[in-house]
Amino acid sequence: MHTEYQFITDTLLNNQFAVVTVQHQRETDPPLSITQPYLKTRAENWQRGAENIRYVINTLTSSYPELNFEHLTLVGHSNGGDISAWYIRNISKHVHALITLDHRRVPLPRLKNIRVLSIRGADFPADPNVLYTAKELERYRACVVTIEKSRHNDMTDHGPTWLKVAINKSINRFLNINSVDSLCI
């Protein structure tokens, strides 16, 4: 649920971000497909989530004109990270940065104008071509960080304190360092 990431919300607020959380799944939505290839069988889910993001941005833009909706940072865990990556790929060019927590299906954007931090758990690999190759990491403003001994399902408020601290440390460094090269060291 979108309400299970208060530890990240607090970090973003401490960094002077306005934060909006989006609940993508509705009770009337079909269950997430468990049939390969996911890029095809889950596309409807990700498109619906991307449209949710667009709707929220459009709605908030008129209600909060003082906020900069041309310079967004999207953050998502698992399917939320997939939706955020899908949004960047298919809808918006207004995203400045993307932070994913162990998303596994939608390829990270290969765009030079977007900073990307992908925090990885240690228990499940991402699908092929989702993460950057070593050459792509040199080309794009991106960093992939794996947290040793971390588990995908623990990357929420219910996870262990040490993991939330490690996630927030990576996010803080990413938000406060202009060069992702410094983050990936």
Image: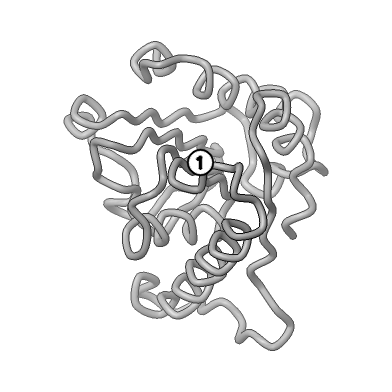
Q: Nearer the viewer, residue 160 or 116?
A: 116
Location of residue 16 in the rendering, given as x and y in whole percent from the top left corner: 66, 27
The three-letter amino acid code for the residue at tag 1 is: Thr
Q: Nearer the viewer, residue 131 or 59?
A: 59
Q: Toward which corner of the image does residue 30 lie, by quadrant?
A: bottom right
Q: Please, is residue 49 above or below residue 111 in the view?
A: below
Q: What residue lies at 63% left-to-right and 58% top-to-bottom?
A: 60
Location of residue 64 in the rendering, given as x and y in whole percent from the top left corner: 65, 51
Q: What residue lies at 72% left-to-right and 24% top-to-bottom?
A: 14
In screen coordinates, is 89 left or right of 84? left
Q: What residue lies at 44% left-to-right and 16% top-to-bottom?
A: 183
Q: Toward which corner of the image does residue 171 lie, by quadrant?
A: top right
Q: Please, is residue 27 above or below residue 102 in the view?
A: below
Q: What residue lies at 56% left-to-right and 28% top-to-bottom?
A: 147
Q: Nearer the viewer, residue 12 or 159?
A: 12
Which image quarter holds the C terminus?
Answer: top left
Helix or strand or loop: what does disc 1 sit on? strand
Location of residue 177 in the rendering, given as x and y in whole percent from the top left corner: 46, 14
The mark total stands at 1
